Image: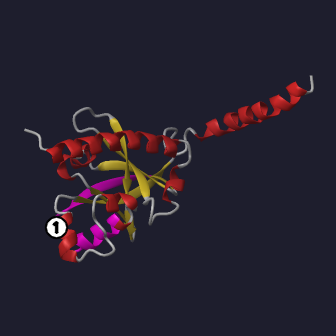
Amino acid sequence: MPTPRDHVERALRQGFRLLNRMMVLLWRLGLGPSLSLVPAITGRYLVLSHTGRRSGIVRRTPLNYARVGETIYVTAGFGAVSDWYRNILAHPQVEIWLPDGSYAARAEELPDSHPQRLALLREVLKGSGFATLLAGINPYTFSDARLARASRFYRLIAITPGAVLRGPDGPGDLSWVWWPAAGLATILAALPPLLRRR
């Protein structure tokens, strides 16, 4: 029988799905990099394109991240039930959209025994802005022991970027809509004065 916590987690996952669709659209409209302008508050975002383990369909998931050296780190905050996490275990070849472009990449889970796991996870959580605080975790003040307890179900993923990708279906592919929208707005703004002169 589902517990109240199960209902809350299900509602949160559904809410995140809706938010994720909106965020992917913002990336396609060319506004994705602006989501990370104040990372301490809003977080730092990328979009992960991954292949469905059963469907074979490409899915896109916005994620908070931290860059340490040349490697990108993300976490599955809902743990092993996250679809994108299970998809990358089955298909580790992914694409990532970063503020400076899109890249072919390879994703790999870091085991719990990795010596730098907690330090790297702390950096990802710092890059998650308000979302981490809403989850009741403060990566700036929690001790290592407390952070380890609070994030025991989290999965940590290392993503190694490779070749730069420039395809027709990627970040900014819908940014052309701003030109006709600006033209229409200009026409609508000019109409009332013109109509008053008649």
Name the amino acid type tagged 1: Arg
On screen, 152 above or below 18? below
Query: Which residue: 92% across, 27% down?
Result: 197
Residue picked out by circle 1 = 149
Q: Position of residue 58 (x, y in %)?
A: 35, 37
Q: How is the image coloured?
A: secondary structure
Q: Give the range drawn in magenta.
A: 103-125
Query: Which residue: 45% across, 63% down?
Result: 41
Image quarter (top left, top right, bottom left or bottom right) of the C terminus:
top right
Number of residues whose C-alpha sits closer than 10 Å to that of mark 1, classed few (under 14), some (14–19) or many (20 or more): few
Instruction: Give the left or right position of residue 19, taking residue 92 as reference.
Output: right
Residue lying farthest to the right in this orientation = 197
- The front one of 104 and 52 is 52
Query: Which residue: 44% across, 66% down?
Result: 40
Q: Is residue 124 magenta?
A: yes
Residue 20: image quadrant is top left
Residue 6 is at least partly visible in this image: yes
Residue 115 is at least partly visible in this image: no
Instruction: Give the left or right position of residue 36, taking residue 141 as reference.
Output: right
Instruction: Give the left or right position of residue 113, taking residue 129 as reference.
Output: left
Q: Is mark 1 on a helix, strand or loop?
A: helix
Q: Position of residue 121 (x, y in %)?
A: 28, 67
Q: Position of residue 26 (x, y in %)?
A: 51, 44
Q: How many marks?
A: 1
- The front one of 117 and 148 is 148
Image quarter (top left, top right, bottom left or bottom right) of the N terminus:
top left
On screen, 187 above or below 134? above
- The front one of 167 and 172 is 172
Residue lying farthest to the top in this orientation = 198
Residue 45: image quadrant is bottom left
On screen, 13 above or below 37? above
